[in-house]
Image (cartoon, grey):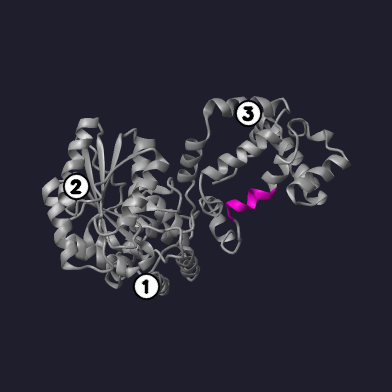
């Protein structure tokens, strides 16, 4: 996500030269490259031009501190303006009513039905909501089947009427059902089309007017680039939606839709889909997205994902084991499996400041851990708890059972032992003591 844009912006900043101040002369070339990078990322032309004009106006004449280079100051200004361009603050979903009704809209193929399931899972697991999914796509039986499969997968009830061809009546009946069952959130999946057409617009407008949802979300495939923005504009003019959800931001997308859409339709992006799994839905934070675009990583989102997966009590117990040098391969396997639950490994690495560029051409995914898991799972429980008992014949048996070589087993055991020593050093306080004794850096 945004890899090409980040690279081009970085090259643009390198062209900025100047002593003490950013001048109109030394900023012109940089902003020319910035505008080109934005257009290449499929950002709307008017948005790109307005953005660079604002950055230029704010940058020219700004004093540069001795500890800050002109390029660094330009990055700061760019970050501020990118964040503002994408909405500034996070935009919360409206869940004040009981029940709260959320109407999903969008073109066919945008990922709307899958997104409905992801949103239901998000609201259930992170907001504690009691959710009902409603199948109002009366034209595609497969869409109804898909919603039922997703609902079963995440433990959420799905309401459908296969013989009913009136989505308004289905929605009304679903709302009555939710009230009787004490469900406080209703997500209505609607029909899409291959293109914007009058029949689809009439149907979704009639549905919205009748059920009066608290939140109408427009779901759009970010990989369609500028077309996504044009489609959003057409939908907004007709149904006046409340917010946008961008899907497939984990794909080979240039990112222009994320940057342009608010300026064109004046509606915030509320969520972004970042993968195929049901938990691959993130709240959209403009500032964090600016961090990623400018190659600064996103350490806050990384920490939040870690907190969702790691239990504090279990972490405290693990710390005690590390301090006593009792951290074993069972513990190591458990940590690997929890890291995998946090999301795609390459995406997680890109959230670490400075790692995005380093990981660009590295082919790494969750399957990269499979051979490690296979080796550990081929050991007996005693061998996992006491790796030191792994003799030559035992290693040969483990290698055979995991489909790896004895050299692979030896490599894993050495890496594990090195990691265990390092973890013990940090836990016992030696590292903290070393840090305290280091001379302070001058500003």
Residue in the image at 30% along x and 56% along y: 141
- Of mark 1 and mark 3, the one earlier in the sequence is 1
Kindly check if marks 2 and 1 are in contact, taking CB atoms under 8 A apart as contact. Answer: no
Position of residue 426 relative to residue 247, above or below, is: above
Residue, disc 3: 318
Instruction: Give residue 330's position: percent from left, percent from top.
Output: 68, 34
Q: Is 84 situated left or right of 171 in this image? A: right
Q: On residue 292, which mark appears?
A: none
Q: Residue furthest right?
A: 392
> Residue at 79% across / 47% down in the picture?
399
- Which circle marks residue 39 in the picture? 1
Asked if the stretch drawn in magenta spans residue 340, the answer is no
* 181 to the left or right of 17: left
Q: Is residue 99 visible?
A: no
Picture disc at residue 170:
2
Q: Quadrant of residue 337?
A: top right
Label 2 Cα crowd, 10 Å radius (few <14 / some 14-19 / many 20+): many
- What SS does tag 3 mark? helix
């Amino acid at each position: 996500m945004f890899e090409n844009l980040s690279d081009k912006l970085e090259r643009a900043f390198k062209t900025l030269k100047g002593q003490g101040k950013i001048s109109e002369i030394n900023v012109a070339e940089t902003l020319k490259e910035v505008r080109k990078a934005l257009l290449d990322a499929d950002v709307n032309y008017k948005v790109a031009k307005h953005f660079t004009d604002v950055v230029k106006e704010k940058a020219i004449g700004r004093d540069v501190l001795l500890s800050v280079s002109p390029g660094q100051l330009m990055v700061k200004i760019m970050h501020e303006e990118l964040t503002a361009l994408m909405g500034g603050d996070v935009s919360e979903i409206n869940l004040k009513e009981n029940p709260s009704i959320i109407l999903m809209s969008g073109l066919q193929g945008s990922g709307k039905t899958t997104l409905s399931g992801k949103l239901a899972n998000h609201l259930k697991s992170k907001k504690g909501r009691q959710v009902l999914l409603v199948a109002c796509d009366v034209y595609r039986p497969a869409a109804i089947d898909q919603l039922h499969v997703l609902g079963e997968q995440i433990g959420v009830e799905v309401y459908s009427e296969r013989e009913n061809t009136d989505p308004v009546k289905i929605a009304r009946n679903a709302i009555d059902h939710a009230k009787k069952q004490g469900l406080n959130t209703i997500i209505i999946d609607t029909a899409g089309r291959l293109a914007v057409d009058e029949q689809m617009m009439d149907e979704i407008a009639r549905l919205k007017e009748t059920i009066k949802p608290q939140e109408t979300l427009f779901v759009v495939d970010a990989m369609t680039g500028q077309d996504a923005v044009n489609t959003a504009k057409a939908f907004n003019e007709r149904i006046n939606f409340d917010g946008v959800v961008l899907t497939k931001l984990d794909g080979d997308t240039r990112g222009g839709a994320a940057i342009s859409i608010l300026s064109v339709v004046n509606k915030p992006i509320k969520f972004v889909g970042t993968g195929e799994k049901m938990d691959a839905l993130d709240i959209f934070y403009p500032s964090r997205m600016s961090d990623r675009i400018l190659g600064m990583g996103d350490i806050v989102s990384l920490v939040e994902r870690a907190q969702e997966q790691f239990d504090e009590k279990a972490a405290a117990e693990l710390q005690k084991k590390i301090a006593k040098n009792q951290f074993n391969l069972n513990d190591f396997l458990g940590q690997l499996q929890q890291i995998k639950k946090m999301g795609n490994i390459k995406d997680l690495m890109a959230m670490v400041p400075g790692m995005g560029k380093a990981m660009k051409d590295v082919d790494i995914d969750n399957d990269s851990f499979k051979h490690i898991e296979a080796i550990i799972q081929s050991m007996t429980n005693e061998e996992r708890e006491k790796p030191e008992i792994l003799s030559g014949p035992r290693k040969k048996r483990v290698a055979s059972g995991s489909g790896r070589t004895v050299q692979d087993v030896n490599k894993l055991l050495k890496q594990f032992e090195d990691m265990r020593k390092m973890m013990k050093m940090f836990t016992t306080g030696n590292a903290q003591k070393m840090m305290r004794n280091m001379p302070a850096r001058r500003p």
